[in-house]
Amino acid sequence: MAVMVSISLRVLYSTVLRATPHRGLAARTHYESLGVGARATQAEIKQAYYRLARETHPDARRSPEAGAGEAAAFGELSAAYEALSNPVRRRAYDLQLSSAAAASRLDGAELDARLAHAVKTDRLADALALFLQVHALRPAPIRPENGGALLALCIRRAHMRQAAFVYGRLRDAAILDARARDAWFRACLAHGRADEAMEAFREMEACGVEPSASARAAMRQIRAYAAALADQRVT
């Protein structure tokens, strides 16, 4: 029996993250904590550490309220420097990172396959939960066709809030294909979201995606209507 889906994405997202193993999640690496690249020299790592240490050291805090946050930041910074300042420890850490990345790719492929099956069997709640798990991996191993199919399912169910969330995450991860972009544009038009439709159309053009003839015709109508409204305000 079909059940009406009503999902709080914030609650769903936090639940998924609590249930997902930490291996492969987009946690900050020691390199990110220091603000350097993985190919940084030892001198660059040292320079970054001392620069950030002056800013985050608990003794340098300007207010008592900031103490806990700055202490945590300094602890993270110190752990990063301890791991990367020694070449032997750094090599061991790099191996750990590469192993975690390989495991994430394997986990991601399985999750992406489950996502595709959930969408195919019209299980929106399960599909959204799986989407959030896959999206939490870095890089997010979502195939464009699966992300687009989930977006289409949200649109077909008229869950525009969830559709907007999925569209935004796919766009940020640069895995939106032309069909998904066009589907989102049409959905925005159908639901009277003219501003979002115009933004989606501009994004299509900026990304080199050729909008369909009907999409161009719809945009001409929107622009003509907007121009008419502007003329009315002037007069």
Image: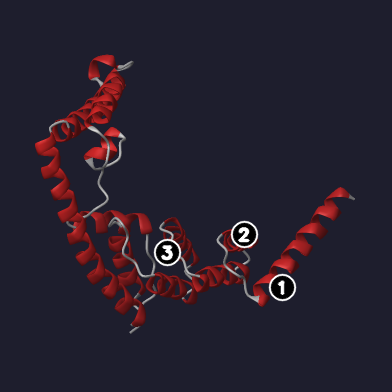
- The type of residue carrying mark 2 is Arg
Mark 2 lies on residue? 202
Q: Is residue 180 left or right of residue 8?
A: right
Taking the spot 82% from the left edge, 59% from the top edge, the residue there is 228
Q: CA distance from mark 1 to mark 3?
A: 26 Å
Disc with the residue nearer the chain's start (2 vs 1): 2
Q: Nearer the viewer, residue 233 or 115?
A: 115
Q: Which type of secondary structure does the marked residue at label 2 adopt?
A: helix
The total of numbered circles placed on residues is: 3
- The type of residue carrying mark 3 is Ile
Location of residue 178 in the rendering, given as x and y in whole percent from the top left corner: 52, 71
- The type of residue carrying mark 1 is Ala
Between marks 1 and 3 in the image, the one whose residue lies nearer the viewer: 3
Mark 3 lies on residue? 175
How dense is the environment of label 2, judged by Cα within 10 Å: few (below 14), some, or many (20 and up)?
few
Q: Is residue 227 left or right of residue 82?
A: right
Mark on residue 188? none
Q: Image quadrant of residue 187?
A: bottom right
Mark 1 lies on residue? 217
How dense is the environment of label 3, judged by Cα within 10 Å: few (below 14), some, or many (20 and up)?
some
| Residue 105, above or below 4 | above
Res 22 visible? no
Location of residue 182 in the rendering, given as x and y in whole percent from the top left corner: 56, 71
